[in-house]
Image: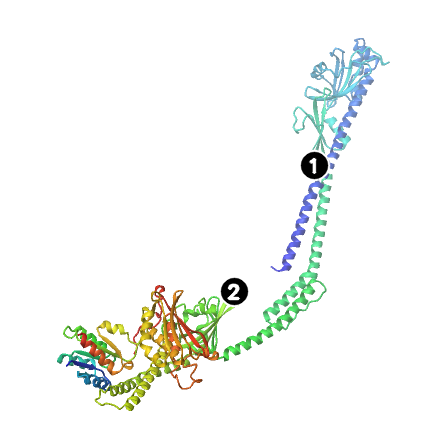
Amino acid sequence: MSIRAKTLIIIVFTGFISIFFLYLYLSKSVINTYKILETKDAEVNVGRVTEALGAQLNSLESKAGDWGTWDDSYSFVQGKNDAFADINFNAIAFEQLQVNTIVYVHNDGKIYYIREYDYKIKDLVEPNKNWENIFSQEGILQKDADTSTNGIVMVGERPVMFGAKPILQSTGKGPIQGTLIMARYLDDDMVNYFSKIVKRPLVVGNFSNNKWGVAANQNIVVKAVDNNTLYGYALVKDIFGNPSVIFRETLTRDIYNYGLQSLRSFLITLSVSGIIFVLVIFILIEFNLLSRLMRLSKQVVGIGTEKNLSQRVGLYGGDEIGHLAININSTLDDLEKLTEKVAFESSQRKSILETMGEGVVVTDSKKQIIYVNPAFENLLGYSAKDLTGKIFNTTFSAYDLHEKALPKDFLEDEKAQIAKGSQVKVLLEGKREKRAAIINTSPIIVSGKKLGVVRVFHDYSAELELTRQKDDFFSIASHELRTPLTIISGNLDNIIQGFGGTKLTETDNKLMNDTVSSSDRLISMINDFLNVSRLDQGRVKLEIKPVSACDLTEKIISEMTPLFKEKGIALKLICDRKHSEVLADEDRLRQVIINLIGNSLKFTSQGSVTISHKVSGNMLVTEVTDTGMGIPKDKQSLLFHRFQQAMSRTLTRQPGGTGLGLYISKEFVKLMGGDMKLLNSDPGKGSTFEFTIPLEKYAINTGEDYSKKIYN
Amino acid sequence: MAKILLVDDDPLIVRMYQTALSYQGYDIESAENGIKALEKIKKTDFDIIIFDVMMPEMSGLDLLTAIKADPKYKNIPTIALTNLAGTLDAEEIIKLGANKYIIKSEHKPKDIVDAVNELLKTK
């Protein structure tokens, strides 16, 4: 939903709700007010009925007064003036007096005289019998001269208005001879008369057959009938204080309807002004905010979809939206510059990756290949399309350089090679053939999180092939050279021994001996070459078993003692027989010890050579110390390298050799689980070499990774 | 005098060892491979058999196995000849029944003579 629609909905909704509640409140309170007004008005109107009634009663009372305070009446009630009644109370007199009944009552409550007139038939009628019972109650009969009363009394079922006065002499003096009562029925004629006075329809009913539900304690009750009509009830009590009749006045609900009408016009005004308010607010928001925001949004979205960062937002104004536009533009400036820079760098990187000779593979955090450069495609023969999305370590099978399959997880990202950032040399199964590669691996780490891995593959196949050819050459050449040399050496010895049957001269013998020893040196050199070649190809098989280093060294010393004696050099052994049991290949260990002692002998012209064995941790440490010429510092680092003889170029021809002895010795020691180093050496003072071999009780199985095949 | 069978495919090697051993007075016969050697063993009773490990047709190891499998010949002392130390398991040859093994390039013919003398002495 757009922000415009949302705003509109919110404003309209709020306006509607406000008007609704305002209306709800006003309708309640205003209508109530009008209803109260209406009731008050009705009460006043109904009050007029009782006023009219009161006036009528007063008139009856004064009529009773006129007739009661009169000597004629006074004597009449004493029975002294019987003609009085016939003269005065005829139809004409009733028509003038406008009363229905005239009653003379003695002080003891007995009716002395009663006459009744009916205005409908315009004649005297038989008086209502029920008058006889009225005067037993106190209230109507007058006891004092100066009193009088009026009110309503129920005569039987008929309500009667009356006025009562004591019967006195015309001078107003007593004694009181009785009470004169002038009465008028509260009949339809009277009601019509009252109705004319109050100018409203009027009905009267007895309280005893209360059909309008007015309670005895209510004087005036107002009840709405419908929207236009209202009944006002007035309850009138009789002279004894008992509810007697109820007037019902019919009123029109003008006030109420005026109220409704004004409320309606108020609602219309409210609604119209509410709509205007909503419109004005919306138009203000629209012009100041919404239209500009929409425009800004449209422009930014446009820039986003077209990916055209050279576009700018066009929107002005000193308010926050104007500032926002300025900020967006400045961000776009930065973004444009950055994008250009990134594009340049990315194109530069692409060129580097595509032209470099080394294969590059990038994997993501799910180990899936996401990039392969052309050099890698060439290396294994798979196209980038084939490889993208594949899991790197399960796609390629890896082998070690001796074509032995490596574990399936060898190329796993989590392998140690990555942590170390080091290289591994492996053979990889290509589309057509296995290729040798040196893999350099580096994790891509962004803010501490590994997002992937970059692998760089140096194609090493040609070098490996060359190495193989060299090894093969060494192997074949050594083998083929050795047999003739063995025969030369053997047959020369046969001649020296005289096995051919000839006795040589002393000179011949010396010459023959020189030739044999040269031939032997040649054989030992060839054996060295072959050993190196086999070490390189991993084809050396060790036979590891417990060997007593002391026994072995003693044997070697006894064999070599003649050579030392010849040069006048002492040969010493320091050894603790109890702690000299090692796990080693006896032949190789012998070769190593002979090599070190032989070297010492070679480079020592006087003094001694000492070989010592001691235990250190789980290794037997063997040191060979001489008092020879020592090794210059700058040559020491070359010692264990192939074809290096630290002294070969600095010395006279004296020692000689292939320069492979130390290299082979160190490699053998390493294969047996130990190591070898030059412990110290001072030129002119001597050197100490040290090597270690695992002790037997800490058996570590080494050499397991090497082929058990028999080579010859 | 003791009879010795010398088995090697290289006639020069054969002649070299034969010269040394004949000088000691031993009666030498030679064969160029295992098959020929087995034929000779059937005809003649030898006191010692010296054989090269690496030979065409039938290798020295097969020859040794064949000799040791036959009750008639299994007690004849044997000496194995090899080319280079470390490549062939010496223990394995001894296990198969050879009394000695000698690396040709590291020993002189007279070492063979010494070995033969020693074996005949203990026989």
- In the displayed orientation, state which residue is furthest to the right: A171
Q: Residues within 10 Å of mark 1 (few under 14, many from 20)?
A: few
Spatial CA distance of label 2 from label 1 is: 87 Å
Toward the viewer: A82 or A541? Answer: A541
Q: Secondary structure at mark 2?
A: strand
Which chain is mark 1 on? A
- On the image, the x and y values in percent for residue A123 come to 74, 20
Q: Amino acid at mark 1?
A: Thr
- On the image, the x and y values in percent for residue A20 come to 67, 47
Examine the rendering and report whether any part of residue A530 can be seen.
no
Residue A371 appears left or right of B92: right
Residue B29 appears left or right of A415: left
Q: Secondary structure at mark 1?
A: strand
Quadrant where the C terminus of chain A sits is bottom left
Toward the viewer: B100 or A570? Answer: A570
Mark 2 or mark 1: whose residue is earlier in sequence = 1
Q: Residues within 10 Å of mark 2 (few under 14, many from 20)?
A: few
| A507 over A366 or under it: above or below | below
Which chain is mark 2 on? A
Examine the rendering and report whether any part of residue A373 can be seen.
yes
Q: Amino acid at mark 2?
A: Lys
- Judging by the rendered image, the residue that carries numbered circle 2 is A449
- On the image, the x and y values in percent for residue A163 come to 77, 20
Label 2 or label 1, whichever lies nearer to me, is 2
For the point 21% across and 85% down, which residue is it? B18
Q: Are marks 2 and 1 on the same chain?
A: yes
For the point 26% across and 78% down, which residue is it? B102
Q: Which mark is residue A229?
A: 1
- On the image, the x and y values in percent for residue A95 come to 78, 22
Toward the viewer: A631 or A150? Answer: A631
| A2 over A241 or under it: above or below | below
Classify residue A296 by image quadrant.
bottom right
